[in-house]
Amino acid sequence: MSTYAPIGLTGGIASGKTTVAQLFRSWGAFVADADDISRHALDVGTPCYEQTVGTFGRHILLPDGVIDRKKVASIVFSDPEALAVLNGIIHPYVHEVILTDSERVFAETPRRLIVWDVPLLFETGYDREVGKTVVVTARQSLRIQRIVARDGSTKAAALRRIRAQMPDREKVKRADMVIRNNGSLEELETRTREVFDELLETMDR
């Protein structure tokens, strides 16, 4: 019998996590994307919008009432306390949306695989709320190449972004399942399908 036990999916920058999430979704899984929810958290009408304006003041608004994200970024990234306050507004909202959406999907389709796509899965403690954790990894040299090609950044800048995150070896140590993305897209799809099928099997145990 299927039980409510979401899968936690994570992986460092340029590991291929987004591609894995897209494959899961294409095969019928419901994927709750923490980054996507976070991007919309400050939209007009959300609880985060009201809290953020109330906290930082109306000077962060554009003429049409939309929050000026560049202005907010300039405030919080130069003030750790302000960043902590903003995170304290956004993170609980993201968590609530993920929970609410997942519970709705489970109630509607109990046999559907539910995946929480959370970049900071282990750092934020989301791993304690899921049934299994899946980590996508890739060799550092490949990740650097992908970041440089995708973002036009320097190798040094790409390396700094990688090192700012939890090391892959630590994520692998904590993970239940690992998808190594060091080859072709076809190889990634094959391995992802193996993991997907295994996760479906666990729902029936």
Image (cartoon, rainbow, N blue to C red):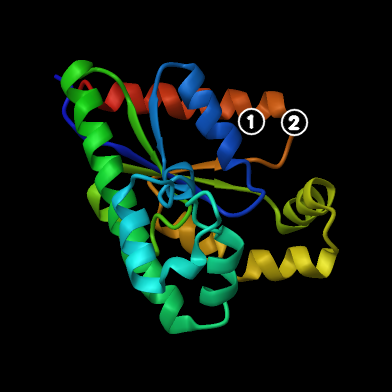
Q: Considering the image in quadrants, where does the C terminus appear? A: top left
Residue 139 placement, left or right of 190: right
Could you say which quadrant of the image residue 169 lies in?
bottom right
Type of amino acid at the residue the image marks with label 1: Leu
Q: Considering the image in quadrants, where does the N terminus appear? A: top left
* Residue sitting nearer the eye, 188 or 73: 73
For label 2, the SS is loop
For label 1, the SS is helix
Give neighbour class at mark 1: few <14, some 14-19, many 20+ (Cα, 10 Å).
many
Q: Which mark is residue 188?
A: 1
Q: Which residue occupies 25% across, 47% down?
A: 96
Residue 66, placed above or below residue 69: above
Q: Position of residue 108 (x, y in %)?
A: 20, 17
* Residue sitting nearer the eye, 110 or 91: 91
Q: Position of residue 12 (x, y in %)?
A: 58, 54
Q: Which residue occupies 40% across, 68% down?
A: 86
Type of amino acid at the residue the image marks with label 2: Ser
Q: Which residue occupies 25% across, 54% down?
A: 128
Q: Which residue is mark 2?
A: 184
Q: Which mark is residue 36?
A: none
Q: Position of residue 199 (x, y in %)?
A: 35, 28
Q: Are marks 2 and 1 in contact (CB under 8 Å)?
A: yes
